[in-house]
Amino acid sequence: MSNEKKAPNLHNVEFLRSAVKESDFPFDSLPQIVFAGKSNVGKSSVINKLLNRKNFARVSAQPGKTIHINYFTIDKQLYFVDLPGYGYARVSKAEQQRWGALMETYFAMGLLTLGIQIVDIRHKPTRDDMTMAEWFRASRRPWVIIANKLDKIKKSQIEGNIAEIRQTLLLPEEVPVIPFSAEKGMGREEVLSIIFDHVARKEE
Ligand code: GDP
């Protein structure tokens, strides 16, 4: 008999709650896979693509307007944790401060299993992307970069753009950058296998 647990059923997904303060966070032992990215980078689209859903994680109508952390439970085995989008141009100082305070709260609790930071493969990462990378680096937890919107660049640009992302975010060698298209599905299997791998390791 095999001890291997079956991969989580991605169809069995439920919205758990939006968290804004410490007591809102689930303090159980389920792995937490955390998604972060600039508003409009395609974070909701990436989550939807991973889950093979069309409209599960909301596709943002008002980028940057939601400063809370959304929890989704996957097959009662793990959480997808959707951090609020950042870097929206018209956001106020007060909202920026709320974003920073919420990051402080989340990262201080040490609940993170795997960080997934989404950037746009077409562009050099922004200052806000660098700040987010700093949160993940400081967490000392495993972390990967999804370079989204792959379908929007030429094949010949991929390597150079990924090198620029690595340099700008000062990525340690062990942090992979995965070219991805939430539109077309490229990169999906690779990201899922990294997620399942970390879930399995946490259960060991
Ligand atoms: P969020 O604000 O980060 O959650 O971004 P959304 O998921 O709402 O996506 C922002 C816009 O980018 C939408 O118009 C999406 O259809 C589009 N988008 C997201 N991912 C991709 C992708 O991989 N390729 C292309 N071509 N468009 C994408």
Image (cartoon, grey):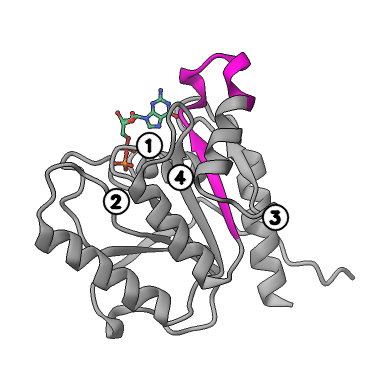
Residue range of the region highlighted in magenta in the rendering = 143-159
Q: Which residue is mark 3?
A: 174
Cβ atoms under marks 1 and 2 closer than 8 Å: no
Nearest to N terminus: mark 4 or mark 3: 4
Gap in angstroms between the C-alphas marked 3 and 2: 25 Å
Q: Which residue is mark 1?
A: 54
Nearest to N terminus: mark 4 or mark 1: 1
Q: Residue furthest right?
A: 1
Nearest to N terminus: mark 3 or mark 1: 1
Q: Is mark 4 within 8 Å of ligand 1?
A: yes
Who's the residue at 28% across and 43% down the image? 39
Inspect the magenta stretch and tell me whether residue 64 lies in it.
no
Residue in front for this viewpoint, 100 or 199: 100
Q: Which residue is mark 2?
A: 85
Q: Is mark 2 within 8 Å of ligand 1?
A: yes
Name the kind of residue labelled 1 in the image.
Answer: Lys
From where the camera sits, is residue 54 visible?
A: yes
Cβ atoms under marks 4 and 1 closer than 8 Å: no
- Categorize mark 3 by other alpha carbons within 10 Å: few (<14), some (14-19), many (20+): few
Name the kind of residue labelled 4 in the image.
Answer: Ile
Name the kind of residue labelled 2 in the image.
Answer: Gly
Q: Which mark is residue 122?
A: none
Query: The N terminus is located in which quarter?
Result: bottom right
- Categorize mark 4 by other alpha carbons within 10 Å: few (<14), some (14-19), many (20+): many
Gap in angstroms between the C-alphas marked 2 and 4: 10 Å
